[in-house]
Amino acid sequence: MAHRRALRNERWIDMEETEKKEKKIILSGIQPTGIFTLGNYIGAVKNWKKMQDEYNCAYFIADLHSLTIRQDPAALRKQSLNAFALLLACGIDPEKSLIFIQSHVQTHAELCWVLSCCSQFGELSRMTQFKDKSAKHADNVNAGLFTYPALMAADILLYQADLVPVGIDQKQHLEFTRDIATRFNNVYGNTFKLPEPFIPKAGAKVASLQDPTKKMSKSDENANASIFILDEPNVIINKFKRAVTDSEKEVCFREGKDGINNLMTIYSAVTGKTMEQIELEFAGRGYGDFKLAVGEAVAEELRPIREDFKRYSEDKAYLEQVYRKGAQTAAAISARTMAKVKKKVGLLAL
Ligand code: AQP
């Protein structure tokens, strides 16, 4: 099969000090809570692909994080494998980037425990995601939801990441990671690199097509609110036709036009056109023409991903080979940090 290649992960395995200095380390994860949306794609994965040549990238399926919300076990297993295949289909190349499934690498849970013991109840209680999610899932306000930032800190600090691409919603968690790393380094001596937030040049927040004041989300109950990256072209076009806009007729990016602003942001992200070019292109034409153009452009952008996903997901042996290799490499790299941490906090070596 065309996508089958020898897997070396060379850049990561042989990453000696020299290369480490040349290329910064980027780390990011995505939860396997469903098929990725156009928001996940434009806001994260599309950029992840672009960053592979310039940086040493580590990308993972954050399945441990997704346990903070109640999951159906069989569905979660399937979603994790699908999410992994989706990363490959979106152009994440296992020869350039380290890709793995979080729960396959035990150091994540292990460091999370140590960092939980360095986290204060007060600072965790101030996390807005905890407040939002505990309000949304009032019947399951579990300890994992509360200590989620400690796991995210472990994910980042294990790989000594320089940069972490974050949306505004995750900024507070990255600040927490920096605080906890600083605290640990002050008490035990220099152990962790302090990660910086990374805002990619072409990163955009994509809003729900049905309520443009909300972000587009995998878990939105309204199927018309989100474009899933495996949606068929006719489904995509119909969802855009139904997108909520306003009662005016002018395609222009302006405060108060949340629906049109969102569609322009999406169109710009997939075509590379500026807002001015888009305004000119649709001057004097109605919203109908514009919505159709956005739908067609998105369907075309996602077409190769849908096709590649089909090929990857049919080749379970290849997927297993890639995630096994990724887990081995991630375990070897993260073990270096974990060994340092254990020694510093006083855990007896085996
Ligand atoms: N609407 C969005 N616009 C831009 N970026 C987005 N991201 C998510 N939604 C949008 C970015 O995608 C990356 C992975 O997100 P995640 O799966 O770890 O969690 P999430 O942000 O909670 O994504 P969802 O789709 O909303 O999932 P559910 O419904 O399960 O909560 C992140 O970089 C995120 O910023």
Image (spheres, grey):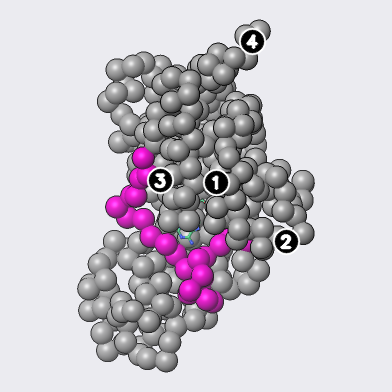
Numbered badge on residue 348 = 4
Give how far apart the Cα atoms at labels 4 and 3 are: 35 Å
Question: Whole-percent x and y of residue 197?
Answer: 37, 44
Judge: label 3 CB < 8 Å from ligand 1.
yes
The mark that comes first in sequence, 1 or 2, is 1
| Front residue of 155 and 229 | 155
The mark that comes first in sequence, 4 or 1, is 1
The mark that comes first in sequence, 1 or 3, is 1
Give how far apart the Cα atoms at labels 1 and 3 are: 22 Å
Disc 2 residue type? Ala
What is the crowding at mark 4: few (fewer than 14 residues within 10 Å), some, or many (at least 20)?
Answer: few
CB contact under 8 Å: marks 4 and 2: no
Disc 4 residue type? Leu
Looking at the image, is 244 positioned above or below residue 214?
below
Give how far apart the Cα atoms at labels 4 and 2 are: 40 Å
**Residue segment shown in magenta:** 196-219
